[in-house]
Amino acid sequence: MTDDRIQRMQQLVRELNEASDAYYNGQAERMTDYEWDARFDELRQLEQLTGTTLPDSPTQKVSEDTISGQKEEHEFAALSLAKTKQVADLVKWAEQRPIWLSWKLDGLTLVVTYDGGRLSKVVTRGNGHIGTNITHLASAIAGIPKTINYSGHLVIRGEAVISYEDFDRFLMESGEDYANPRNLASGSLTLKDVDEVRQRHIQWIPFTLVYIDTPPPTLFDESPLKSWGQRMAWLDDHGFRTVERLFLEHPTTATVEDGLAVFTQKVTSRQNPFPVDGLVICYDDTDYAQTGSVTGHHATRAGMAFKWQDESADTVLKEVEWSCAASTISPVAIFQPVELEGTTVKRASLCNISECERLGIGAPGTRLSVIKANKIIPKVIKVTERVGTFTVPDQCPVCHAPTVIKVSDISGTKTLHCTNADCPAKQLRKFARFVSKEGMNIDGISEQTLAKFINLGWVSEYADIYELRSHIRELSLMEGFGEKSASNIMRSIDKSRTVEAHRLLYALNIPLCGLDVCKRLLAAYPLADLVSMTTAPSIAPTIAPTTPTASPASTTPAGSPAATTPAGSPAGSPAAEVFAHIDGIGPEKSASFVRWFRDDRNMQRYQRLLAKLEVTTPDVTPSGSLCEGLTFVITGDVHHYKNRNELKAYIESQGGKVSSAVSGSTSFLINNDITSTSGKNKKAQQLGVPILSEDDFLARYTAP
């Protein structure tokens, strides 16, 4: 035993605990999984060599979330699993007994308990013995039903995760800085506001049924549920969305390798929407699984975690590209192409300035080591030879406005930001709404694709999207596209040139003007008249409202008068009165609509866009009168219609109106959960508004 070894162990314990604390509590990432695993393995080897285990060693404890709130002791300890990267270890552990393979989801473990058919509590894993009660957030987490069809005591363990798609969307819309979906999930559960948590789109996926009392007999066995597979199937039958899994009746080296290959292929082809950091194997025989001993911080037969060997490659940095998003300007390493996991990799996100400093990123020529973390995400894991220093741009790559470095008060992370509020990169959400199905309906252009177009300088306003054909050759050569994909995008853009007026108005992102407001405005006036009236100086409308006709779709003239009045029209001003008389509009929405068109920049961009479009006005005359004179509010899920918009369209086709809020003018609230204690149900009851189920509505207001 030498002092050098002990000092190294102390350093490793400190670094690993600090990184683990940041990882499990929504803070900035201190090191990659690759680095953590390497340090953990080194520490474990030193402990074996020296015969010494330091206090607070991560090899002897469960990594702990420290979410604040009411603490609660677990009924059943939530211990961690032994880990391996070797197939031989899995085969040896299985002991030729039937096993299951399942995802090791990368999120935050939550223990969910039911009693008498109702959710009784949700508790974080904590240190495995004591967690934090977050039952108040249950309604904001998808996959945790309030009630189930089972009256006994039930304890389920599952993972709270955020999909890659929802993670990317959140970063773009919020501008917040999180390293990965797991980081966002853990950070979200520290929040108190249920609505704010709901916006993070957290999903809870059960991965084991911990306890069930007096379970019903299985189909072929009169005894309680003894099989792990049967237990998971029971959860499926009771409405839970459980983890994906694969049964291996005879675990040999060959069958285990085949099973691992099934999951590996799904990871590498991105068929799995959620982040994972490996796989879990467990015995099908739950009684046998409980006979193991507890060693360190895990039960020997509770299961074993498998992590893929990360294939690394050395390469040379060509440049650091700075990519603009809704809020931050992020560094991306562009390096000489290398082959990893069967694919060619030539770029990897460096996340932020702090990560560049931590890794020691230098100038072009710096030698790097890169991996595909969990076989998916390219990642720079270390700098092997630094050349010069990297520079942070003092101008935005998109709009060339000055940049500023901001330091997070919570994590100390340094991020780069553009100071121009009107930078096209900051308008990503608006461009996404413009191409959305409800807007211009341009298929094939995602938010990520829009971000690329903006960073390349191809798109800075809506009209630019209709000039993308001039870049079709470049697009077809871009990574992830190709000639077919580029051609499909162009066809979708061309198809969208003919657009209904309400979709165009919605796509313009006018504040307070959702799809319903746009339809109401256009039901009163043609599009050209609406735009003309925004520049009229008088308080009262200068053009009489039009009554929709039953004629075929007509085309709106492509052109409107230029704005002549400065922007800025508060409620109570003439602008607030222009359209306030239209049912469902009011002074605030009227003022917002007028103010948008009185902005010279908006008007000029609108006219450039309009010149590229053919705008139609569809026939909106009701086809029936079954709902005439009635106003409905729709809430909750629908079963007979595809969605609430389809039900709304039917009501409007029958002469009725649909409002978003219950009021004294509401005729009926449609809610399939009539006994719900939701805010809309309570409001309806207070005002004496009848509540109809969907079946009630169909019986009353559809033709026999």
Image (tube, helix red, strand yellow):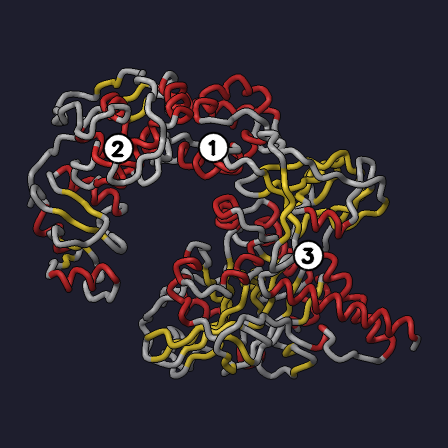
Label 3 residue SS: loop
Residue 492 image position (x, y, % from top left): 42, 25
What amino acid does circle 2 point to? Answer: Ala
Residue 481: image quadrant is top right
What amino acid does circle 1 point to? Answer: Ile
Q: Residue at x 77, y 40 (%)?
A: 390
Q: CA distance from mark 1 to mark 3?
A: 33 Å
Taking the view exactly as shown, the residue that stands out farthest to the right is 2
Is label 1 or label 3 in front? 1
Neighbours of disc 3 within 10 Å: few (<14), some (14-19), many (20+): some
Residue 117: image quadrant is bottom left
Answer whether residue 589 is visible to the viewer in this image: yes
Residue under numbered circle 2: 575
Are the residues tagged 1 and 3 within 8 Å (C-beta)? no
Residue 395 image position (x, y, % from top left): 65, 33
Q: Nearer the viewer, residue 52 or 420?
A: 420
Quarter of the image containing the N terminus?
bottom right
Neighbours of disc 1 within 10 Å: few (<14), some (14-19), many (20+): some
Q: CA distance from mark 2 to mark 1?
A: 36 Å
Q: Earlier in the sequence, mark 1 or mark 3?
A: 3
Q: Residue at x 41, y 75 (%)?
A: 121
Residue under numbered circle 3: 308
What amino acid does circle 3 point to? Answer: Trp
Q: Earlier in the sequence, mark 2 or mark 1?
A: 1
Residue 67 image position (x, y, % from top left): 54, 70
Residue 327 image position (x, y, % from top left): 55, 43
Residue under numbered circle 1: 445
Q: Residue at x 40, y 70 (%)?
A: 136
Neighbours of disc 2 within 10 Å: few (<14), some (14-19), many (20+): many
Quarter of the image containing the C terminus?
top left
Q: Earlier in the sequence, mark 3 or mark 2?
A: 3
360 relative to 296, above or below: above
